[in-house]
Image: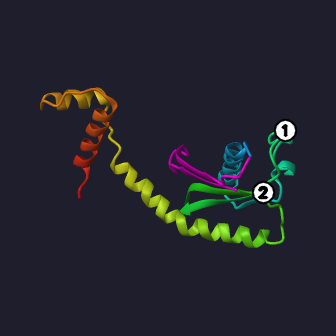
Amino acid sequence: DFANILMINPKTAHTVKTISRRNEESKNAFEEKISKHISGWILKKKNVFHSANMCTDDRFAKSLFRGAAPMAIFGAPLWSEGRIIGTLVVGKSDLDSKQAEDEKKLLEDFAAVIAPFLHNTQALQSYFESPTDTNTLRAKYAQAGLLGSDKSFVEMLHAVEAAARCDV
């Protein structure tokens, strides 16, 4: 019913990006809360997560998911170069546990395949982050006749500054 990828900076453990997708028919308003808590569990335990029914899972406070539709939840850490760079959490309303172990293994294998690609994306992102503050950039480029203060202009200045640092 839903899938969530949480990408973190391995050095700071801060969230870099969250990508969520849900089935149009999914009516569970708790998906974001579930993903947040499951991701926290995965990051803390550094292990794969499975719950046949989140609403009755003893690892979490009984009141945490009160009112949520029963869901089977699977989660896996995204490992790259020996570090966790994020989590992958999926939920489904079908509580049939006959294939749970196979689904858990499939998710773990899928996480292993996609993690290096996501890590590469994070590494590329660092090339486009400008360490120069906005006022300094505006002053620098004003000397060259480039004047402006709207958001898109400032973003362009940051991109130009980041591109100038790249050795491509």
Using residue 37 as the reference point, say whether residue 121 is left or right of it: left
Quadrant of the rendered structure where residue 29 is?
top right
- Which quarter of the image is occupied by the N terminus? bottom right
Q: Secondary structure at mark 1?
A: loop
What's the residue type where badge 2 is placed?
Ser
Quadrant of the rendered structure where residue 168 is?
bottom left
| Residue on which disc 1 sits | 63
Q: Is residue 15 magenta?
A: yes
Instruction: Give the image location of residue 157, x and y in percent.
Output: 26, 37
| Residue on which disc 2 sits | 93
Residue placed most toward the observer, 149 or 105: 149
Q: Which residues are magenta?
A: 1-27
Q: Residue at x 74, y 73 (%)?
A: 102
Q: Residue at x 70, y 61 (%)?
A: 48
Instruction: Give the image location of residue 81, x and y in percent.
Output: 50, 64
What color scheme is it? rainbow
Q: Secondary structure at mark 2?
A: loop
